[in-house]
Image: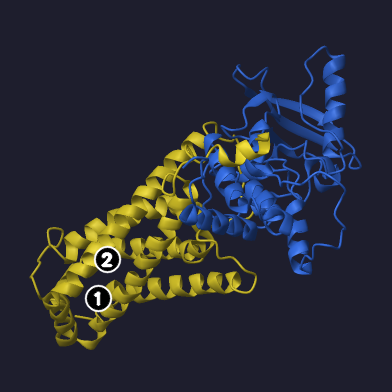
Chain colours: A yellow, B blue
Amino acid sequence: MSAAATALTGKSADRPGFWANPIGKKAVMAVTGFVLFGFVIGHMVGNLQVYLGPEKLDAYAEFLQKTKGLLWGARITLLTCVILHVTAAFQLAGLQNKARPQKYVKKTSAGSSYASRTMYWSGPILLAFIIYHLMHFTTGQAHPDFQPGMVYRNVVTGFQSVPASLAYIVAMLMLGTHLYHGIWSMFQSVGINHPKYTPLFKKLAAVMAAVLVGGNVSIPVAVMTGLIR
Amino acid sequence: MKLTLHIWRQKNASSAGKMVRYETDASEHMSFLEMLDVLNERLIAQGEEPVAFDHDCREGICGSCGFVINGVAHGPLPSTTVCQLHMRHFKDGDELYLEPWRAAAFPVIKDLVVDRSAFDRIIAAGGYISVSTGSAVDANALPVRKKDSDMAMDAAQCIGCGACVAACPNASASLFMSAKISHLGLLPQGQPERMERALNMVAAANEELFGSCTNIGECEAVCPKGIRLEFIARMNRDFLKASWTFRADRVEGD
């Protein structure tokens, strides 16, 4: 057997598998990120019913609570996606530290977006926010006056606290930057990059990030300005 | 023009290095490396150790030269190796920081010189095609779509300088690997090994401790040969397909 043939076939046994490989992990992050992105859109559309008044929003919340299949199906899917996404991110961040043990004295960015360079910051901040958000509006421990089932009222009383509203606004800006890179990057990670489509993905990313930040931030702002009471 | 240089000085692979400050004169007609040559002449005359840096052709095609200038691999001019960068792009009184490529896979040998043999090992893992011996095949016997050959040539521009690794915040070799995988994978001659090539080159890069790609595009911005992120997507595609459809080798007697 020639040396070339040995190099080609000899390694198959000890070659790392799909998950052990950074490209595999990135593909998992892309797919789970896509699911989470889809959820964030649905979540925002549902939340915007706050503008239709207490009856509408509370009825919507009650519908979700009663439809156990949908509720738990979504919860399990989302939890799985978050676990995979975060695990891959942590492992890849560890690899980053090993791959560049000695930092540059001076490093200037030549062509990357601020959003793309700060994924390792926006990600953990969003994770912390998700935990706070669940304790705020789902389980209620972080809410000053939580009333189970009274979603509209909980939103209004929750956002009347300025620190809570500010935390939400900051978190949504983080979500915006995370998605500004993430929405087009997930296509690249699974191997889709084409001069015809990639510019569209980048535009889609910018538009969707802006829509999500605008839509979600509007709610605490509406409460603080007294538009919703 | 007068320049202040802060240069990474490191005696050898095992010693610790540090930034050392130098004042020097340069003409705007000099290339960056000629400016360093002049500094080195002076250092030698003073009985000091000259600054070691890699260089060979000095016409931007060999891939030997390269270091980081003020935080940008190959310096501020796009699509240019450091040997083709001229001092007219700088101004009198500039303060420049010169550092070697920084990556675990590229250990510093001396000053601005790093050991890039990790790239050679990645190439050995799959960056080749098998060609039968005998007389050469007629050049036009194997049709290649024009757009494919153009793209293969774009990818083949890669000179393996390592700037992509240096610029990447993750010290990933993805742009380099993707250039080789695309260059060969776009042509009919590269098809027989295509799937194993993606698996083996990617596995070799992991073994060398290169980082993972986060699609941020710093590599594309500094690449002196204009290799595009699109090729990384192509590599991801080949790798994912090969990884999902891989069949174990058939062993004689099974």
Q: Is residue A92 above or below residue A146?
A: above
Q: Which quadrant of the figure has residue A142?
A: bottom left
* Percent position of residue A216, x then y: 33, 73
Pointer 2 or 1: first along the chain: 2
Label 1 residue SS: helix
User: In the image, is A212 to the left or to the right of B183?
Assistant: left
**In which image quadrant can residue B92 be found?**
top right
Is there CB contact under 8 Å for labels 2 and 1? yes
In the picture as drawn, the residue positioned furthest to the top comes out as B47
The residue where tag 2 is placed is: A165
Residue type at mark 1 is Val
Tag 1 residue:
A223
Give the alpha-carbon distance from disc 2 to disc 1, as whole Å.
9 Å
- For residue A217, say whether it is visible: no
Which element is circle 2 on? helix
Q: Residue at x 16, y 65 (%)?
A: A138
Q: Output the chain of dot 1.
A: A
Residue B115 at x, y percent in the picture: 67, 29
Left or right of B140? Residue A61 is: left
At a point 35% along the width and 74% down the height, the residue shown is: A41
Q: Indicate the amino acid at tag 2.
A: Ser
Quadrant in the picture for residue A33 = bottom left
Label 2: chain letter: A
Q: Is residue A45 above or below residue B125?
A: below
B167 horizontally vs A88: left or right: right
**Residue B59, image x and y in percent?**
87, 42
Query: Does B191 sit above or below residue B33?
Result: below
Q: Few, some or many C-alpha atoms within 10 Å of disc 2 (few <14, some 14-19, many ≥20)?
A: some
Question: Does the rendering let one see residue A55?
Answer: yes
